[in-house]
Image (cartoon, grey):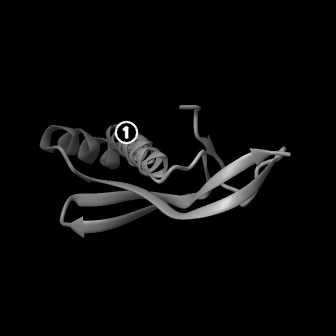
């Protein structure tokens, strides 16, 4: 199967949407790691980027994105437009990263 085309916009240059299949979505819930939390707390005192959390959230976004892509493929899509990410706290020390967009069939113009 060909690679899925992803776009944060509602259209893709050189393609037209021939069918809308629905919402494709993917999510993951991540909790803080005690060891990384201690390092992050120390960095927070000194100031600057908290790399442990940056890495954790980047990994979580990638997992959510890959799950959204898989869902779109299962729907028969060859593209997802309007891709967005959302984050919400689900428990103390745990957050959900949610990727979603409109699964579509794209055709070259």
Q: Quadrant of residue 33?
A: top left
- Where in the figure is residue 91, as x and y percent of width and height? 19, 67
Please give the name of the residue rendered at 29% of the width and 59% of the height, measured from the top-left corner: 95
Please give the name of the residue rendered at 62% of the width and 63% of the height, measured from the top-left corner: 20
Side of 41 relative to 69 (left or right): left
18 or 56: nearer the viewer: 18
Please give the name of the residue rendered at 25% of the width and 47% of the height, measured from the top-left corner: 41
- Where in the figure is residue 83, as x and y percent of width and height? 58, 56
Side of 6 relative to 96 (left or right): right
Please give the name of the residue rendered at 32% of the width and 38% of the height, measured from the top-left corner: 52
Residue furthest out toward the left: 34
At label 1, counting other C-alpha atoms closer than 10 Å, the crowd grade (few under 14, some 14-19, many 20 or more) is some
User: Helix or strand or loop: what does disc 1 sit on?
Assistant: helix
- Where in the figure is residue 14, as x and y percent of width and height? 84, 44
70 or 100: nearer the viewer: 70
Side of 2 relative to 85 (left or right): right
Tally of marks: 1
Q: Which residue is mark 1?
A: 59
Placement of 80 over or under 55, stated as above or below: below
- Where in the figure is residue 4, as x and y percent of width and height? 58, 40
């Amino acid at each position: 199967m060909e690679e899925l085309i992803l776009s944060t916009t509602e259209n893709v240059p050189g393609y037209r949407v021939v069918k809308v299949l629905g919402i494709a979505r993917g999510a993951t819930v991540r909790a803080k790691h005690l060891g990384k939390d201690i390092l992050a707390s120390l960095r927070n005192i000194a100031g600057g980027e908290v790399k442990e959390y940056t890495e954790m959230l980047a990994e979580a976004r990638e997992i959510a994105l890959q799950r959204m892509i898989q869902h779109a493929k299962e729907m028969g899509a060859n593209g997802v437009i309007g891709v967005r990410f959302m984050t919400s706290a689900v428990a103390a020390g745990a957050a959900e990263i949610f990727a979603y967009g409109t699964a579509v069939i794209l055709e070259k113009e």
